[in-house]
Image (cartoon, grey):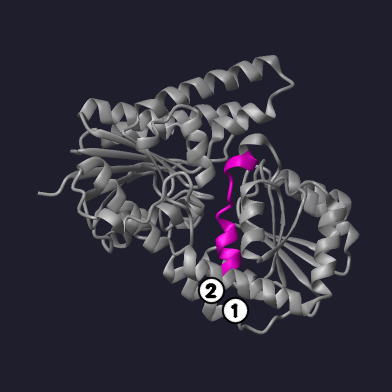
Amino acid sequence: MREKLLLLTQFFPPETNAGANRIGPMAEALSSHYEVCVVTPKPSYPSPKDYRHLSLQRYDAGYPYEIERAFDFLPHAGSLPVRTFREQAMAFRLAARALRKPADIVIASSPSMFLGPAGMALARIKGAKFVWDVRDLTWGYAKDVVKDSRTMSFAAWGLKKYMLFVLRQADLVIGASSGITQVLIQDGADPGKAITAPNGISTEMLDDITQRVGEKKEDKRPVVSYAGLIGYNQNLGVLLDVARRLPEVDFVLAGDGPELPSLKERAAELGARNVSFRGYLDREGLLRVYAQSDLLFAHTSSSPTVDATMVPVKLFEYMASGKPIVYAGSGIATDLLKKLDCAATVPPEDPGAISTAISALLQDPGRMRSLGQNGRVAVKEGFNRDRIMEEFARSLDEHLVGSGSYGEQQAIHRSSSV
């Protein structure tokens, strides 16, 4: 009889954001090894109304595992303290919903860090093994950005202590990048109980993007696009300054997030007519943006935690599109892009350097083709999410069940993995 596994997650398909795109293939892979039950809010990102037309009962019936949909949850509603409180409540409400489900293993997956403590509590109540899938070191980001406030610095210190206590209680910790895994080990995770399951792109998404790449571009003006979360770490206000420097280029921002309202307001104040906001897009809309773009842009603010851990998931979709990338950032993401030779990399928060990089690429079609081809080859060969998650499921079996049946086949690497 197969062991029973509970998977707690804030996001899940039919949502199409980074969290849902990671957990969907993870649940699929785990269902080949365990009796899986996913416990998650009703699809709510960016708004529950976007899914009112969908029959969830019919949609979920297509999965080879059980899905327990709990309640609507608006992730960006309210001020930062309000969102923090609401996220904690959401996490423990999910855990409470899962109490009636049998479990031998409980996996809690970020981005909501509060699912870690909730998952640990649930596992302890059930006498189950606790696994924490860590996509973001949110408590580290908080520590990096509140240095000027003694009260907020103390709160961030307490938050980190709380999360590290939970970390040390885990039977297994999963980092979504080698940098995350290394930081978790430095913070006290047992190296023998820490693995890396990197992000990537699914075969289905790769095929869909490939089919759309050859579409004829509608606009003769150059188009530079950003697609993804519009949040604090992305600091996309810099792109408005770039747009002012390059009036001959059109800039597209596709996505939703806490910074979107203020970004729209500033764009209106600046009269940035060459900047358009597409909002949150379904897969078809996202593929259309990729097909119609000449360059794809990403920006990540620099901080010790971000530089050491963050490889934005959007970069893998960007690479799959075969389009050249301009990445403004530092740290392990920059190192990876340079290694793969698929992007022009510049320092973050530098409109002049970003503008120069965009202009230089638009004037060099040969370099653009080369970067795009390198990215597509790299993601096809090294970042297939379906394969990564199947290897993760085997590694989980080795660590928690102790079957050892996969031996040298294990391809989820220790902290040295990318």
Dot 2: within a 10 Å radius of its alpha carbon, few (fewer than 14), some, or many (20 or more) residues?
A: many
At horizontal 25% and vertical 54% (from top left) the residue drawn is 407
Tell me where the magenta segment starts and ends, as one range: 306-320
The residue furthest front is 408
x, y percent for residue 189: 42, 30
Is 230 placed left or right of 41 in the picture?
Answer: right
Q: Please say whether residue 278 is visible from this viewpoint.
A: no
Give left or right: position of 274 versus 382.
right
4 shown above or below 130: below
The residues tagged by marks 1 and 2 sit, at their Cα atoms, a distance apart of 6 Å
Q: Residue at x 50, y 50 (%)?
A: 45
Q: Nearer the viewer, residue 327 or 55?
A: 327
Q: Nearer the viewer, residue 267 or 384?
A: 384
Q: Residue at x 81, y 62 (%)?
A: 357
Q: Residue 260 placed where, x, y %?
A: 68, 47
Amino acid at pointer 1: Val
Q: Are the residues at dot 1 and dot 2 in contact (C-beta closer than 8 Å)?
A: yes
| Closer-to-camera residue (287/408) | 408
- Left or right: 358 as drawn, with respect to 14: right
Which secondary structure type mostly characterizes the magenta part of the structure?
helix
Q: Is residue 377 above or below residue 10?
A: below
**What residue does disc 2 label?**
209
